[in-house]
Amino acid sequence: MTSINGATGHHAHRTQTEADYCPLCGTAISAATRARLDEKLRTQLAKTEQTLRDQFAREQRQAAAKAAAQVAKAKADAAAQVERVRKDATKAAATALQPKIAEAVAQAVQAERTKAYGEKLSLEQQLEEMKRRIQRRSAHDIGEPAEIDLHAALAAALPKDRVSRVAKGVRGPDVVVEIIYEGSIAGKITLDSKDHLRWLNKFTIKLREDQIAEGADFSILSSSAFPVGARELYIQDNVIVASPARVLVLVHLLRRNIIENYRLKLSAEARNEKGAKLLAYIGSAACGDLFERVAKLTADLLDIGSPTRLGRTRPETRGLA
């Protein structure tokens, strides 16, 4: 095969002069024709390049739109899946919590019932306390303070001892009981009487100071009010706090201890040790239970001996008189 430039079987580069001839027919190409061809070639190249650019941009937009659609669909699918999972989880949680909710509601109802019952008991106790106070106010209504009632009760219960009241305006306890044994003073018990609606810690602090000043063996505070959580019988500041109904029994118990110590001629240290043990016993649950039983038996005996009880007749004896 013969090439345009006359070379056979080999590739050869054309010179600038050879380039001015048509590669196909070898006809000379004028400069104007060459210029038109070059311009036409540049125009076609530019159009082709622009076409390719437009096609590439279009394909990019289509790919971006497709990707955006796929992302949106994936988001929608994920959101739907999350919603299904949430609904399933909510349903499962509600099913699992149903027994607990029912139990919580039952506990809340029971708590409210317990609270209402406690408030009812508290109101009933307050009502009973007011009734007892009204019954105890007879001496106060005629101008006699509570310590006069305490002094009179102790004087009647302890005829062999010396029961005295501290004069008004003089610092000291309301009542001092001097225990007399074979003509000598074996010991002392100091007492205060408080008929207050509210407890104050200064009650026992003051009585303890009076006990030390008097050199007494024991001190008893007869009170209708008690510290929070205490009732009927309580020990505070080495002072026995007792309801008025317990005072006489306590005085007899302490009196026996004082006389026993006096007879044995115990040292001050031994007396203090025995006194501490006695106070510990008085403040114990066992002693409290004992006093509760004594109070119940006393109430039963009073009920048996009451005119109302004595006036009753048994059904089988009616009409036999």
Image (cartoon, helix red, strand yellow):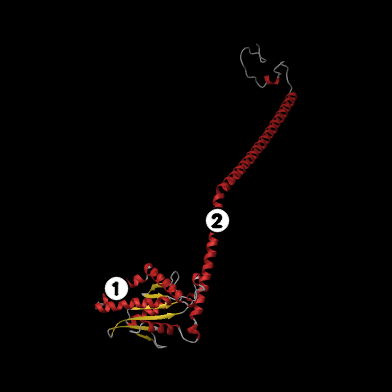
Distance, label 2 to label 1, CA atoms, is: 53 Å
Q: Earlier in the sequence, mark 2 or mark 1?
A: 2
Furthest residue toward front: 320
Residue 167: x and y in percent read 40, 88
* Image position of 193 (left or right of 255): right
- The residue singled out by tag 1 in the image is 274
- The residue singled out by tag 2 in the image is 106
Front residue of this view, candidates 173 and 305: 305
Residue 145: x and y in percent read 46, 84
Residue 146: x and y in percent read 45, 82
The label number, if any, that marks residue 265 in the structure image: none
Q: Indicate the amino acid at tag 2.
A: Ala
Front residue of this view, candidates 293 and 118: 293
* Image position of 305 (left or right of 275): right
How many C-alpha atoms fall within 10 Å of the one at disc 2: few (<14), some, or many (≥20)?
Answer: few
* Image position of 225 (left or right of 239): right
Residue drawn at x 39%, y 78% as measured from the top left: 248
